[in-house]
Image: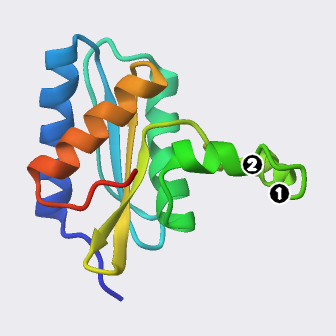
Amino acid sequence: MSTISRAAAVALIEAVRHEAAAAGFGVATAVTDAGGHLVAFERADGTPFLAAEVAVDKAWTAASFRLATHTLNAIVADPQVAPLAHHPRLMAVGGGVPLFDGDVCVGGLGVSGGTAQQDVDAARAALKSQGFSVPD
């Protein structure tokens, strides 16, 4: 199974930290492999402690479903799949994105600490700066 390297995970975390600092918020950032296992994590000083767990769960959710978590938010609004929203680790809030190498998912990135839109923006900017595809 292809997976993200630790070096690439750390580079993504540094890129997220830079974007969040420029936007004026502290951030917790998590990177998982394709199986949802944590590869790298960082929580900036002063970032709420809950953001740490949320970032890990956003990365896990994005890797699991191979979808951005803001997209999954709209999906779980459908009554036929709404029960998924009760899964303890599912985090259908913007800021989680799958990581692809070509067509292969190699992991997930989770960003938490700002508003959902700030988290999405920081994740997208970090992906772009590191050469990953950027989901809609």
Quadrant that contains the N terminus:
bottom left
Could you say where residue 38 lies in the image, as x and y percent from the top left? 39, 58
- Residue pictured at 44% horizontal, 32% vertical: 52
Q: Residues within 10 Å of mark 1 (few under 14, many from 20)?
A: few
- Residue pictured at 20% horizontal, 40% vertical: 125
Q: How far apart are labels 1 and 2 at the CA level?
A: 5 Å
| Secondary structure state at the residue bearing disc 2 | loop
- Of 38 and 17, nearer the camera is 17
Could you say where residue 124 lies in the image, as x and y percent from the top left? 27, 43
Could you say where residue 103 lies in the image, as x and y percent from the top left? 33, 81
- The vertical placement of 61 against 92, above or below, is below
Task: Confirm or deny contact between disc 1 and disc 2 (CB under 8 A).
Answer: yes
The three-letter amino acid code for the residue at tag 2 is Val
Q: Is residue 13 visible?
A: yes
The three-letter amino acid code for the residue at tag 1 is Val
Q: Give the residue at mark 1.
A: 81
Q: From the viewer's perspective, is 130 left or right of 52?
A: left
